[in-house]
Amino acid sequence: MKILTFGEIMLRLKTPEHLRIIQSQNFEASYGGAEANVAVSLAMLEDKVSFLTKVPDNPVGMSALKEIRGYGVNTDLVLKGGKRLGIYYFEKGSNIRQTNVVYDREYSALSMAEPEEFCWENLLRDVDIFYFSGVTPAISENIEIAVTEALKYCKEHKIQVVCDLNYRGKMWSTEKARSVMKKLMHYVDLCIANDEDFEATLGIHAFDGDMAHGIDQIETYKKGMEEIIKQYPNCKAVASVLRNIYSVEDGQWMGIYLCDGKFYESPIHTVHSLEAVGAGDAFAAGLLHALANNFSPQKLIDFSITASVIKLMVQHDFNVVSEAEILKVMKSKDVNLSR
């Protein structure tokens, strides 16, 4: 099956060691972004995946494309133009000090793109699954329009749509997110909703905001997932990551999946995290890989959460692990990854 992900790739500038941004005189450069992260994960899992975005036709834009091509992602559909690549600054937290991200993505090549630049008839030719997250329509009103047009084309041509609601409060308000995502959800076949995503993007209660006791709220998560299916009949399945976060490094993670009226739960993984950025994208990629390869629902959620928790031990945005590595951890039934 052929998968297309649509979103923005950015230059990532990380402070060395555990310095705060205000302290740092040097930054480590790499690349990342939700849908680019998913595309690289899928390529590592040997799926046929293309990434769609727009980057400036300059050395920085070409370097970003070179990076993901190196992992096997097809970039033939990428548009070129505009003046700059978006940037995000990453400051890793420690213990009770939270990780912090600062966006510098205004006027980026993708945010300034016009909807008519995206010819979906050509871009979605032979595509079986189209993936985007809530980050993408939040980039600009033009990209919101482009996503809407893509989803309409998918609906008309029976292309499966998978969406990670992926709410980012630094990009838009809950009011704006709800006004957009409630419309887009009518075209989504499978939805990923984690933590605050339910309430922030769809106005559905599932989580009270206490990250130390996310897994303990599994029953309200399940009710929220059922409510998504009820409100959006086109959506046939919902997946979620539940977490008990005790510090930036330590916590417990599990996944649940609602499909055909039945819930499937993964084991609970106890983890000591090296870097949490991209773990949600690794979960989404695991799910897409499972769909593309016809995994059973139980294997799907076990594989997806295992991919996600392994990412916690991998630096930078991309989850550069193979299917064999994920299956080895999954089949070992060793859910204590903190050792």
Image: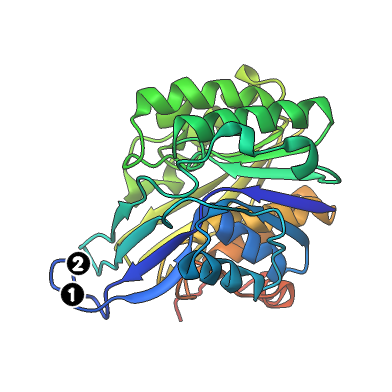
For residue 66, which quarter of the picture? bottom right
Question: At x 61% / y 26%, what residue is drawn?
Answer: 185
Question: At x 71% / y 33%, what residue is drawn?
Answer: 189
For residue 28, which quarter of the picture? bottom left
Question: At x 71% / y 25%, what residue is drawn?
Answer: 152
Q: Position of residue 178 (x, y in %)?
A: 45, 24
Residue 157 against residue 182 in the figure, above or below: below
Do the residues bearing badges 2 and 1 touch, measured as CB atoms within 8 Å?
yes
20 left or right, relative to 231: left
Residue carrying label 2: 21
Q: How is the image coloured?
A: rainbow
38 left or right, relative to 136: right
Mark 1 surroundings within 10 Å by alpha-carbon count, few (fewer than 14), some (14 through 19), many (20 or more): some
Viewer-nearest residue: 264 or 182: 182
Tag 1: amino acid:
Ser
Tag 2: amino acid:
Ile
Residue 21 in sight from this viewpoint: yes
Mark 2 surroundings within 10 Å by alpha-carbon count, few (fewer than 14), some (14 through 19), many (20 or more): many
Residue 208 against residue 285 in the figure, above or below: above
Viewer-nearest residue: 317 or 80: 80
Residue carrying label 1: 24
Q: Mark 2: which secondary structure?
A: loop
Question: At x 61% / y 58%, what residue is drawn?
Answer: 38
